[in-house]
Amino acid sequence: MDVGYGYFPVNIGQWVIYDVDSTYYDEFNDTVRNFHFQIKEIMESTYMDAQNRPTVRLERYKRYSDTASWFLKDVW
């Protein structure tokens, strides 16, 4: 039975950059703010989880413009 694991390819070193637009509504102050930034996801490495299954470490980086430096946002 195919459960769809092939949908998300896992090649170490592979990365994807997403352009993100976000709108924040502050009803208390009656303001609206728009944000644009990029998220970069890198398939960083593999390790064995607690049930001895191969697992991928995904690092997510963020930056606010094309010329800004990436900073580590979180790890999945």
Image (spheres, grey):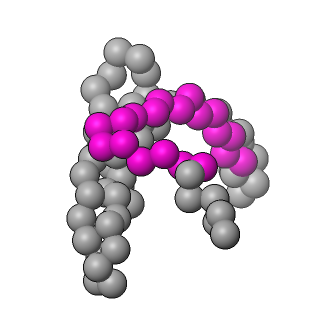
Task: Name the residue located 36 percent from the left edge and 42 percent from the top edge.
Answer: 11
Please provide percent x and percent y for residue 61. Answer: 36, 41
Residue 52 lies left or right of residue 30; in this view the side is: left
Question: Does residue 32 sit above or below 64 in this rendering?
Answer: below
Q: How many marks?
A: 0
Q: Where does residue 17 sit, x and y in percent of width and height? A: 47, 30
The part of the image, by quadrant, that contains residue 68 is top left
Who's the residue at 63% across and 33% down the image? Answer: 21
In the image, residue 26 above or below residue 67: below
Pick the residue in front: 47 or 24: 47
Residue 43 in view: yes
Q: Quadrant of the C terminus?
A: bottom left
> Residue 12 location, x and y as percent?
30, 43
The N terminus lies in quadrant:
bottom right
Query: Residue 3 sits in which quadrant?
Result: bottom right
Q: Nearer the viewer, residue 42 or 39?
A: 42
Q: In the image as oriented, which residue stretches furthest toward the bottom?
A: 51
The stretch drawn in magenta includes residue 30: no
Residue 19 belongs to magenta span: yes
Q: Is residue 42 left or right of residue 31?
A: left
Q: Position of residue 30 (x, y in %)?
A: 75, 47
Is residue 75 visible from the viewing direction of this image? no
Residue at the image point whose x is 34% and y is 65% from the top: 55
- Front-lying residue, 29 or 55: 55
Query: In the depicted view, which residue is nearer to us: 38 or 27?
Result: 38
Q: Residue furthest top?
A: 67
Query: Where is residue 62, by image quadrant?
Result: top left
Q: Which segment did they paint magenta? A: 7-25
